[in-house]
Image (spheres, rainbow, N blue to C red):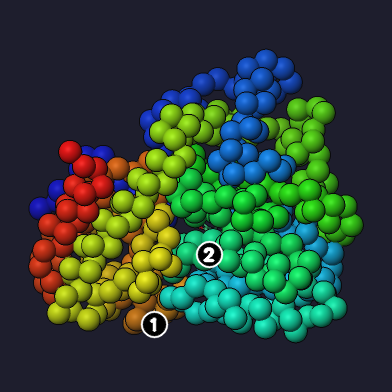
């Protein structure tokens, strides 16, 4: 029997669940792009985007997904042949490196594997091995959506400072923005990159870059800049079209306005706390399922190194794939595939999955996913330890209080 009919829940790490308020804000006739409601409204976005990232710096919006936002950062940071250091803690770190390489940047990679954060001693050694300061920037993923590893960005900045290395620090916050605490200025970040379809709860289509005065100064000599990707007119436009190098992404902007309203109403710190509580709920369930079943485990052992937007886990092949298919077909919930843990052609691939808990997600949604997962494990005879739903409920009860 199929119990999937009802509202479907896409619990993959992006695109995330879109609030009805965001969808309703987008549901309107095409606005005038020269004057009136749209340009007036967009002026209100800039301070709210700065507040979200914790910066007094510059903001540029692009019609782009996360891959486009990476290229925007590369285009403004580098000239052909420049050296860059990429700190990879999962598939997305490698993705940014590959985009930089393809653009002619000599991107070198420190690879910390698929389950561990950046090793600060290795970073320090790599920076000390560059006394001529040829490395122009360090690129790092805050929360890698493939591994769910979270990096300590302030600690990475501290290493740059201790070594006295002038490389700019650029951070991929595509998964983490609006989910995990992020303080661009306090942490000494020069460039932060995000996209609309994760913690910001807007459909895919907007890339967001925040950048410091130092990064702006660097971009003036970056020969990878082209008119479309140049962030300067986007951030300092005197005419509305210059923000977009052409036609504005009209409806996405109304959606973004509404999502920023929702984040402001809840409060940024409360949004972060909600994500932390829901992440701990998911972790508690996996820990219980894994008792006596070493095949079931979270990908990241230390909770301090886990992101709050998504949880990567293994279930033993082929159980993760079986469970994902069952959940979509029988229960109306779609989990994320394991990304970058094994090739799709390898049998091990079917042992990994990811549960997203980013954006417009609350306790009953996360508890519902976990209960549906347990139902699927029962239906499919996947061995699992007892008490996962009780453990998850206890985390929610403890976080929500009386
Ligand atoms: C989703 C994601 C990307 C890629 O974004 P796309 O919109 O799919 O291009 C890059 N980095 C991180 C950390 C992400 O979560």
Which residue is depicted at the point 42% across and 46% down?
A: 272
Residue that numbered label 1 is attached to: 346
Element on which disc 2 rests: loop
The x and y percentages for residue 325 are: 26, 62
Which residue is depicted at the point 49% across and 61% down?
A: 143
Q: Residue furthest right?
A: 221
The number of callouts visible is 2
Which residue is depicted at the point 71% across and 32% down?
A: 247
Inter-mark Cα distance, 1 to 2: 32 Å
Residue 371 lies in quadrant:
bottom left
Which residue is depicted at the point 74% across and 21% down?
A: 34
Quadrant for ligand 1 reads bottom right
Residue 139 lies in quadrant:
bottom right
Is the residue indicated by label 1 positioned so its CB lies within 8 Å of ligand 1? no
The residue lying toward the viewer, choosing from 125 and 195, is 125
Query: In the figure, is residue 356 to the left or right of 392?
Result: right
Residue that numbered label 2 is attached to: 152
Foreground disc of the pair 1, 2 = 2
Is the residue indicated by label 2 positioned so its CB lies within 8 Å of ligand 1? no
The x and y percentages for residue 1 are: 10, 53
The x and y percentages for residue 285 are: 21, 62
The x and y percentages for residue 187 are: 61, 56
Query: In the figure, is residue 71 to the left or right of 365?
Result: right
Residue 156 appears in the rendering: yes
């Amino acid at each position: 029997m199929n119990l999937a009919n009802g509202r479907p829940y896409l619990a993959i790490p992006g695109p995330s669940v879109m609030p009805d308020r965001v969808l309703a804000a987008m549901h309107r006739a095409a606005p005038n792009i020269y004057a009136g409601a749209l340009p007036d409204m967009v002026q209100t976005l800039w301070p709210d985007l700065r507040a979200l990232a914790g910066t007094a710096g510059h903001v540029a919006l692009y019609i782009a997904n996360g891959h486009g936002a990476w290229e925007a950062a590369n285009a403004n940071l580098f000239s052909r042949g420049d050296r860059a250091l990429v700190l990879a803690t999962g598939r997305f770190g490698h993705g940014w490196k590959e985009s930089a390489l393809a653009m002619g940047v000599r991107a070198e990679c420190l690879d910390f594997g698929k389950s561990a954060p950046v090793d600060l001693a290795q970073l320090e050694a790599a920076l000390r091995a560059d006394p001529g300061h040829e490395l122009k920037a360090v690129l790092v993923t805050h929360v890698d959506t493939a591994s769910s590893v979270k990096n300590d960005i302030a600690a990475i900045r501290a290493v740059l400072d201790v070594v006295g290395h002038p490389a700019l620090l650029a951070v991929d916050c595509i998964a983490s923005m609006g989910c995990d605490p992020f303080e661009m200025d306090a942490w000494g970040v020069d460039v932060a990159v995000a996209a609309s379809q994760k913690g910001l709860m807007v459909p895919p289509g907007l890339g967001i870059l925040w950048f410091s005065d130092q990064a702006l100064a660097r971009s003036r000599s970056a020969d990878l800049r082209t008119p479309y990707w140049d962030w300067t007119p986007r951030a300092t436009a005197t005419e509305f079209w210059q923000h977009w190098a052409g036609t504005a992404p009209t409806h996405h902007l109304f959606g973004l306005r509404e999502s920023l309203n929702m984040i402001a109403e809840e409060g940024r710190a409360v949004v972060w706390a909600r994500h932390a509580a829901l992440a701990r709920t998911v972790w508690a369930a996996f820990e219980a399922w894994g008792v006596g079943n070493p095949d079931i485990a979270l990908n990241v052992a230390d909770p301090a190194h886990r992101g709050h937007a998504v949880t990567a886990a293994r279930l033993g092949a082929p159980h993760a794939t079986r469970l994902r298919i069952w959940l979509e077909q029988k229960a109306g919930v779609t989990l994320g595939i394991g990304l970058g843990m094994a090739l799709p052609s390898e049998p091990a691939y079917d042992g990994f999955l990811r549960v997203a808990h980013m954006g417009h997600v609350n306790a009953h949604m996360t508890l519902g996913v976990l209960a549906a997962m347990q139902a699927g494990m029962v239906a499919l005879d996947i061995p699992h330890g007892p008490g996962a739903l009780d453990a998850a409920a206890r985390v929610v009860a403890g976080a929500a209080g009386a």
